[in-house]
Amino acid sequence: RRQRQMCIRDRHTEETGMSFTVEGPKDAQITVELEEDAEYKVTIDGEEAGQMKTNLGGKLSFSADLSPDKAVCVEIEKL
């Protein structure tokens, strides 16, 4: 039997950040590439997950609590 994987949908990218929906059977570690050495506010399903800074390669990593029957909206906004 094939396991269901995490899926990202409806991705929108702008100069000030990005938004997308993600769904999957269990919690996930998500990494996105943004502007390097910049600070961003991350919101997951309407709840602020905090301010995070990208590394020198522009990578930003965070965890999202997922469940098989519900898509989660992620918004990342440059500060």
Image (cartoon, rainbow, N blue to C red):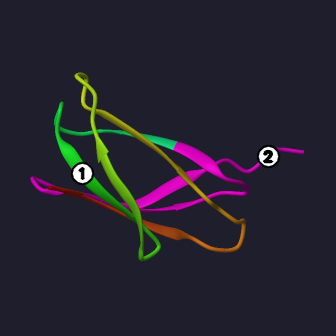
Vertical position of residue 31 compared to residue 21: above or below: above
Q: Quadrant of residue 17?
A: bottom left
Residue occupying the far top of the picture: 56
35 relative to 32 in the view: left or right? left
Q: How many residues crowd mark 1 within 10 Å: few (<14), some (14–19), many (20+)? A: many
* Label 2: which secondary element: loop
Residue at coordinates 62% horizontally, 60% vertically from top-left?
65
**Residue 20 drawn at (x, y percent):** 38, 62
Residue 13 visible, this angle:
no
Identify the magenta region: 1-29
Q: Quadrant of residue 14?
A: bottom left
Q: How many residues crowd mark 2 within 10 Å: few (<14), some (14–19), many (20+)? A: few
Q: Amino acid at mark 1?
A: Tyr
Residue 46 visible, this angle:
yes
**Depth-wise, is mark 1 or mark 2 nearer the camera?**
1
Vertical position of residue 18 compared to residue 37: above or below: below
Residue at coordinates 18% horizontally, 32% vertically from top-left?
37
Residue 55's disc number: none
Mark 2 highlights which residue?
3
**Residue 75 drawn at (x, y percent):** 33, 64
Viewport quadrant of the N terminus: top right
Magenta segment: does it hold 75?
no
Vertical position of residue 63 compared to residue 69: above or below: above
Residue occupying the far front of the picture: 50
**Residue 44 drawn at (x, y percent):** 45, 66
Mark 1 highlights which residue?
40
C-alpha gap between disc 1 and disc 2: 33 Å
